[in-house]
Image (tube, helix red, strand yellow):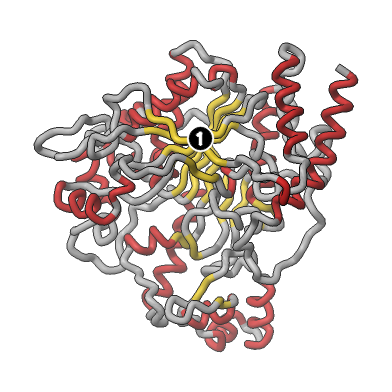
Amino acid sequence: MTAIRMVSSVLLLVLMQSGALCARRFRGGRNPQPRRSPPPPTYRADRGDTTESFPLDFTAVEENMDNFMTQVKNLAQSLYPCSAQKLDYDMKLNFLENTSVTCNDGSPAGYYLKESRGSRRWLIFLEGGWYCFNKENCDSRYETMRRLMSSSKWPQTKTGTGILSSLPEENPHWWNANMVFIPYCSSDVWSGATAKTEQSGYAFMGSLIIQEVVKDLLNKGLDNAKVLLLAGSSAGGTGVLLNVDNVAELLEGLGHTGIQVRGLSDSGWFLDNKQYHCTDCVDAVSCAPTETIKRGIKYWGGVVPERCRQTHEGEEWNCFFGYRVFPSIKSPVFVVQWLFDEAQLTVDNIQLTGQPVQEGQWRYIQNLGIELRNTLKDVPAMFAPACLSHEVITRNYWIDVQVKGTSLPRALHCWDRSLQDNRNNKAPPKGCPVHLIDSCPWPHCNPTCPTIRDQFTGQEMNVIQFLMHMGFDVQKMAQQQGMDPSKLLGMLSSGS
């Protein structure tokens, strides 16, 4: 075992240098905005100091030397110059063994998989993409967004990005996990359990698709997993909240009690708030959030977590809103949520179409940030930047955004460590925060927010340009704060 550890250490050190160098050639879209550059964080297992390591899973070494040598071979292969080979980072399409569980149009549901032999960590990602809630807008969705309702034209492979990336530089702590991407083709916020009928014209089986994917993966190595992270963005983020306990209970019922099931919900924490302007309920974008879900849950035959259903019996639609379902969830869940989420503003009828916003809209936007903060304050593990955006964990800039000097990958790593330490009855690591929320009061007051572009010119806007574009009155705000306008501008530029 000593020799194995020495080989592992040498390979890891070389991989950290050459892998990061190669990975840079594949990266793009990093946030060019200036920001403070703290020393690179480091996460050692034995103390809370600062070198970022790329943890490998060698848990199978003691029992199976073949697994170890396969992993060594995979690592060694990645040390060749990038120009001399094409590394296989692709996830490959698999259709469900249970052909009765389908997409909206009856085509087979499925998933993309990239195995990482030797690793006992699995990441299952639920895609987002709004929803439809009656025959008319589902027909329209089928004509304009068929990919989200049918598997007929899915590609054979898919390359993971962000937390699904196999590049250590883009995905510092999960790059070596088994990656699973479940395409969204049920239009039901991953809640449905209903076969196609003449009346509806479509199947709504989002909840069943997740269950069947998990069952299929048990035959592909999931049965030996240590950790399963169910992640998702937008409708997929809400899907995580609705399904994470069901996945844990499914595995437990099948006898796999040693698998630790966790959730990661990105941009799925919506509010059932009052719209800025009420409009006719035509589709998912124009309707008030509560109205679409009330109609949808009946049309889909939607299933919600049992404990939440009992709490909101007769009004099960409540369980689609994060702050209402979260108290009933037993599995650990990490919530990632922009404080000024673009999808939330869209359903609230705040249209940022290039014209400066009115004063009433500006107040509404600021109040939205306050409301979101209030609903998140009791969530133990969360990352909430004061940015105007939507979705982040599969973006290649996800490592750039920080809250109070901590990046999202770092916060997730701290969360991993805290859960492990809690199981081992250890004190939580110092200097490793997991509850991170911006306190500044307006959109993009955090200088590490993703770049915003003018919708008409396509040019990048800095923080001051964006706030002025939004109708922000520097003179008035400076007067209210009792400070010189130039000082306020300086604070905005630095993100203070």
Task: Give amino acid for label 1.
Answer: Val
Circle 1 crowding by C-alpha within 10 Å: few under 14, some 14–19, many from 20 = many
313 versus 66 height, above or below: below
204 or 158, nearer to the observer = 158
Quarter of the image for residue 177 reads top right
Q: Which residue is tagged 1?
A: 180
Quarter of the image for residue 86 reads top right
Residue 368 in sight: yes
Relative to residue 144, is residue 369 drawn left or right? right
> Please, what secondary structure does the residue beneath circle 1 have?
strand
Relative to residue 442, is residue 318 drawn left or right? left
246 versus 253 height, above or below: below
Q: What residue do we see at 51% from left, 83% from top?
A: 468
Q: What residue do we see at 71% from left, 55% from top?
A: 24
Q: What residue do we see at 75% from left, 15% from top?
A: 65
Q: Position of residue 407 (x, y in %)?
A: 67, 53
Q: Position of residue 43 (x, y in %)?
A: 78, 41
Relative to residue 39, is residue 227 drawn left or right? left
Q: Position of residue 221 (x, y in %)?
A: 56, 20
